[in-house]
Image (cartoon, coloured by chain):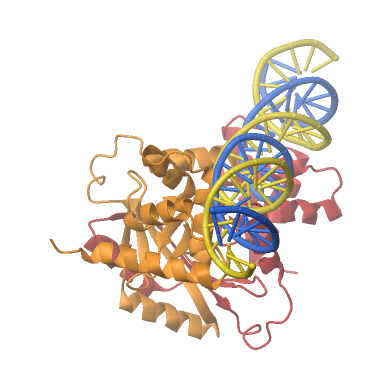
Chain colours: A orange, B red, C blue, D yellow
Amino acid sequence: MYKSVKSFKISEKKERLKNSLKEKGLKSTRQRDVIATEFLRGTGHITAEDLYKKIGRKHKGIGFTTVYRTLKLLTTLGLATERVFADNLTRYEPLPAEDHHDHLICINCGTITEFENMKMERLQEKISNEFGFYTVIHKMEIYGYCKKCKYHSTEVSEYELNKAKAKNKK
Amino acid sequence: MYKSVKSFKISEKKERLKNSLKEKGLKSTRQRDVIATEFLRGTGHITAEDLYKKIGRKHKGIGFTTVYRTLKLLTTLGLATERVFADNLTRYEPLPAEDHHDHLICINCGTITEFENMKMERLQEKISNEFGFYTVIHKMEIYGYCKKCKYHSTEVSEYELNKAKAKNKK
DNA sequence: AAGGAAAATGAAATTCATTTTCAAAATAAA
DNA sequence: TTTATTTTGAAAATGAATTTCATTTTCCTT
């Protein structure tokens, strides 16, 4: 039985977390371990709320606040990054990613697809330079209908619900 | 004395607003007129809060709620569009714009510069197609330091303050 | 192991931009 | 004018994000 690449990466990242905690005089706890594990196992683009719910099903007694704070902690330590799409919810994605990437977001089913394109990167840099700009980061999101939803966008997706919700109380 | 192109456009848009209101059985009011005029005169990318303050200096007794609702109304009628950048504030921009454009945002002084690039548009569409995606809209933002701020980023900008504020209570 | 200082936890409270409510005022049609 | 409908705006509500604080846990030092 071979260890998968992914689980290798997870344990590597968890090791990194442990070291960073020690280095900063912070403590390793059961909660942090559970939260980091669940988070790193996922495909990313998850909200603190959803991660909290996901964890709640398996491990009792881990509060929302702790999930939230752990995701913030991981972000501080460079193991995660925050992203906000059009529904205005803060989502977290494990880092480091293989590479810089942008997102295709289906406005029907909410699926978030990553893509990377060097031509795009270069073009962005070129434009930035033309304006005498020094680029720190950029954000590129394409919203539309994914392959599956293109021809049958009947159901109301979770993404649309979130967006509607966000719209209703923002 | 010639009428400037811009003021011509403003009065044209105000005419359009008036017609849309009548068409929908809504009413023309002093407040709507003042708010629309101030908004259309501006360079865009303004928050409801800031437009409210700007108006407050000249015209007494127009409430924040009315400014907010008028911007929403203009958005509904296709005369404005909402944009949310990294500071998480909702900004409004007059529509229709000359063309689709993206944004360069200075993370020091907060200046928002628009740019348009056809190569970028085509590349985005190409990428979208590769994934079988049907594009509805896209969003491209480059964050960094503008020409002016590149070499002397000493002061704390309003943009940074907003972002810090946003971070502190979001 | 035991003690103790520091950090973590989590329920509850707070924050704040945004959005809604509702009573009073304004508009426009008859 | 009269009246029905819409608008206004102060105040209240909303809700995701964040902080507070009393209690619990970690982990370093004896």
Of the pair B159 and B95, the residue shown nearer to us: B159
Image position of A100 with respect to C1: above or below: below
Rendering coords of residue B67 (x, y %): 71, 45
**Residue under the image location 29 percent in, 35 percent down:** A154
**Residue under the image location 51 percent in, 56 percent down:** A70
Q: Is residue A24 left or right of residue B164?
A: left
Residue farthest toward the left in the current orientation of the protein: A1
Image position of B150 with respect to C28: above or below: below
Q: Is residue B60 left or right of residue B64?
A: right
Rendering coords of residue B34 (x, y %): 76, 48
Q: Quadrant of the N terminus of chain B?
A: bottom right
Q: Is residue A36 left or right of residue B6?
A: left
Rendering coords of residue A76 (x, y %): 53, 66
Q: Is residue B135 left or right of residue A87?
A: left
Residue farthest toward the bottom in the current orientation of the protein: B151
Residue A82 visible? The answer is yes
Where on the picture, by quarter, is residue A124? Answer: bottom left
**Residue under the image location 46 percent in, 71 percent down:** A19
Rendering coords of residue A74 (x, y %): 48, 62
Question: What is the number of callouts on the image?
Answer: 0
Residue B103 visible? The answer is no
Where on the picture, by quarter, is residue A121? Answer: bottom left
**Residue under the image location 51 percent in, 69 percent down:** A22
